[in-house]
C-alpha cells in the first residue's frame, strides 16, 4: 500500500512502521475507569458535536479552541488522549503535538485535519501522533479510535509502573499523567515543618526555618516535589503554596521570632512574590528569604532590582547552603545578603578537622566584617556546636537542638 494512500485510514505508528488498525464496533467503556479526553478545535460547532458524542459514550471531555489553551490545560490536568485539529490560530496541532512530546512520551495524540497533506502527515508521524484523520470523521470511528487510544495510554502507564516495580528506569520520564496526579496530590497535602534556629549565647529561639513537606508517597522528599514542579513548569504554583502556608496563622513568626523561607531562584520571576497584600508580605519585616548558593542566578533577569524590591517590602535576604556550591561569590555581589547560612557539609565533623576549622573560622569572620549574620546549619553533636561557637558563630540550627516538625518543635539547649 503506498504511504499516502494509507494516511486517511487510522494507523498506529510504531518503530516498525504503520499498522492499519481494524475499526471495531463502538467498544464497551464499562470496563474502563472514566477516561479524560482533551478536544482541541477552533471550529467550536464541530468541537461541541464531537464532545457531545464522546460524552454520551462516557468520556469526560474538555474542550479548547486553540493550541495555546490546550497546552495550558495539559500543564495542569491529566488526560488520557488528545484529539486535535491541525489548522488553528495561535498554536496549531503539530506544534501542540511537539509541545506535548517534549514532556510526555505516552499520551496518545490524534490529529484531525480538513486539509490533509503529505507534509503534515509526515510531521505527525515524526512527532509521534497516534493517528492522522481526515475530516469529516465518522462518529463511530472517532469513538472507537478514542477508546482504543485510552486503552493504549493505560497500557503505557501500566508498563511504566511495572518497570518501576522492577526497580527499572525513572517511572516519571514519560508518564506525565502520573506526574501531574502526584504533583497535584503533593500540593494539596503540602504542609510546613519548622526547624528552630537558636541563639546559643542567649539560649533562646531566634527564628524558624520553614521546610516543605508533603504526604504524597510518590514524591517523598522536598527535592522530588521541586523536581516535579520543574518538569511540569509549575514552580510558581509550588512557590505560592509554600509562601502561603509558611505565613498562615499559627506559623512561628512574630515579635522577636524570625521566619526563614526558602525561595527557588525561579520564584524571583513570579510577580506574586512582590504582591504587597500577600500573607508573607504582611509580615515581611520578620521574614528572611533564603536563596541557595547551589543554583545559579544567571538566568534571572535584573536580579538586583528584584532583590531591591523585596528589600523595599521589608524582607531580608539570606544566602543558603554557603560552601555547597562551586559557584564563585557572584551571588554575594548580587544579593548583598543580610544573613549567610553555612552549609552543613562545613559543620559536619568540624571539631576533628583543623583545616576545616580554620577555613570556617575565616568565613565566619569575613561575613561578620561584611556586616552579615551567620547561621550554621546541620549541627548534630555538642562537639560541632562548641567548635562553631568558638569560631564566632552564635546562630545555630540542627538536629542537636530540634528536628524539623509541626509548629513548634521543642528545643533542647
Ligand atoms: O538546603 P537547606 O539548608 O534549606 O536544607 C535544610 C535541610 O536539612 C532540611 O531538609 C532539614 O531536614 C535538614 N537538616 C536540618 N538539620 C539537620 C541536621 O542537623 N543534620 C542533617 N543531616 N540534616 C539536617
Ligand atoms: Mn534553607
Image (cartoon, rainbow, N blue to C red):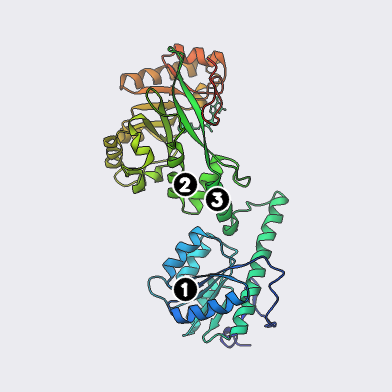
Q: Residues within 10 Å of mark 1 (few under 14, many from 20)?
A: many
Location of residue 289 in the rendering, given as x and y in whole percent from the top left corner: 38, 34
> Which secondary structure lies at badge 2?
helix
In the image, residue 57 above or below residue 166? below
Residue 129 placement, left or right of 328? right
- Expressed as whole percent of the image width and height from the top left, the position of residue 218 reads 62, 47
- 144 on left or right of 95: right
- Which residue is identified by label 2? 238
Nearer to the camera, 178 or 370: 178
- Classify the position of the N terminus by image quarter: bottom right
Single out the mark in the foreground, 3 or 1: 3
Query: Rounded to the nearest whole Å, what is the CA distance between mark 3 and mark 1?
Result: 27 Å
What distance separates the C-alpha of mark 1 from that of mark 2?
29 Å
First-in-chain label (3 vs 1): 1
- Viewer-nearest of labels 1 and 2? 2
Q: Quadrant of residue 308?
A: top left
Residue located 39% across and 19% down the image: 364
Residue 324 visible in the current orientation: no
Could you tell me which secondary element the residue under label 1 belongs to? Answer: helix
Q: Which residue is mark 1?
A: 93
Work out whether mark 1 precedes mark 2 in sequence or the reverse, and give the earlier one: 1
Residue at image mark 3: 183
User: Would you identify the image quadrant in which residue 285 lies?
Assistant: top left
At a point 49% along the width and 19% down the height, the residue shown is 356
The residue depicted at 63 percent of the width and 69 percent of the height is 150
Q: Are marks 3 and 1 in contact (CB under 8 Å)?
A: no
Residue 166 lies left or right of residue 380; in this view the side is right
Whole-percent x, y for residue 324 in the image: 47, 31
Measure the alpha-carbon separation of dots 2 and 3: 9 Å
**Mark 3 near ligand 1 (CB under 8 Å)?**
no
Amino acid at each position: 500500500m503506498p504511504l499516502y494512500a494509507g494516511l486517511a485510514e487510522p494507523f498506529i505508528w510504531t518503530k516498525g512502521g504503520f499498522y492499519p488498525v481494524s475499526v471495531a464496533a463502538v467498544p464497551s467503556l464499562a470496563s474502563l475507569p472514566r477516561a479524560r479526553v482533551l478536544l482541541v478545535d477552533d471550529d467550536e460547532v464541530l468541537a461541541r458535536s464531537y464532545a457531545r458524542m464522546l460524552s454520551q459514550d462516557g468520556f469526560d471531555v474538555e474542550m479548547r479552541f486553540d493550541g495555546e489553551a490546550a497546552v495550558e490545560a495539559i500543564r495542569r490536568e491529566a488526560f488520557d488522549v488528545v484529539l486535535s485539529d491541525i489548522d488553528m490560530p495561535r498554536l496549531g496541532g503539530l506544534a501542540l503535538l511537539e509541545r506535548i512530546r517534549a514532556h510526555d512520551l505516552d499520551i496518545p495524540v490524534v490529529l484531525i485535519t480538513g486539509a490533509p497533506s503529505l507534509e503534515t502527515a509526515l510531521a505527525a508521524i515524526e512527532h509521534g501522533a497516534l493517528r492522522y484523520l481526515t475530516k469529516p470523521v465518522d462518529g463511530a470511528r472517532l469513538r472507537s479510535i478514542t477508546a482504543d487510544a485510552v486503552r493504549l495510554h493505560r497500557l503505557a502507564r501500566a508498563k511504566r509502573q511495572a518497570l518501576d516495580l522492577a526497580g527499572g528506569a525513572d517511572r516519571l520520564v514519560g508518564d506525565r499523567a502520573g506526574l501531574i496526579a502526584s504533583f497535584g496530590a503533593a500540593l494539596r497535602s503540602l504542609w510546613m515543618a519548622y526547624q528552630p534556629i537558636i541563639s546559643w549565647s542567649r539560649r533562646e529561639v531566634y527564628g524558624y526555618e520553614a521546610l516543605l513537606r508533603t504526604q504524597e508517597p510518590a514524591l517523598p522528599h522536598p527535592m522530588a516535589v521541586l523536581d516535579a514542579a520543574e518538569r511540569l513548569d509549575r514552580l510558581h504554583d509550588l512557590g505560592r503554596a509554600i509562601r502561603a502556608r509558611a505565613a498562615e496563622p499559627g506559623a512561628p513568626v512574630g515579635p522577636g521570632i524570625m521566619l526563614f523561607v526558602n525561595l527557588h531562584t525561579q520564584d524571583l520571576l513570579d510577580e506574586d512574590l512582590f504582591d504587597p497584600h500577600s500573607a508573607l508580605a504582611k509580615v515581611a519585616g520578620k521574614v528572611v528569604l533564603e536563596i541557595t548558593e547551589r543554583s545559579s542566578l544567571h538566568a534571572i533577569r535584573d536580579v538586583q532590582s528584584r532583590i531591591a524590591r523585596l528589600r523595599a517590602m521589608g524582607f531580608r535576604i539570606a544566602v543558603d547552603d554557603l560552601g555547597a556550591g562551586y559557584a564563585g561569590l557572584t551571588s554575594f555581589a548580587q544579593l548583598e545578603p543580610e544573613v549567610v547560612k553555612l552549609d552543613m557539609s562545613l559543620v559536619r565533623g568540624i571539631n576533628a578537622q583543623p583545616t576545616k576549622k580554620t577555613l570556617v573560622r575565616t568565613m565566619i569572620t569575613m561575613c561578620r566584617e561584611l556586616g552579615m549574620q551567620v547561621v550554621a546549619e546541620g549541627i548534630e553533636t555538642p562537639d560541632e556546636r562548641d567548635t562553631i561557637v568558638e569560631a564566632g558563630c552564635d546562630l545555630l540550627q540542627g538536629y542537636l537542638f530540634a528536628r524539623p516538625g509541626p509548629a513548634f518543635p521543642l528545643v533542647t539547649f
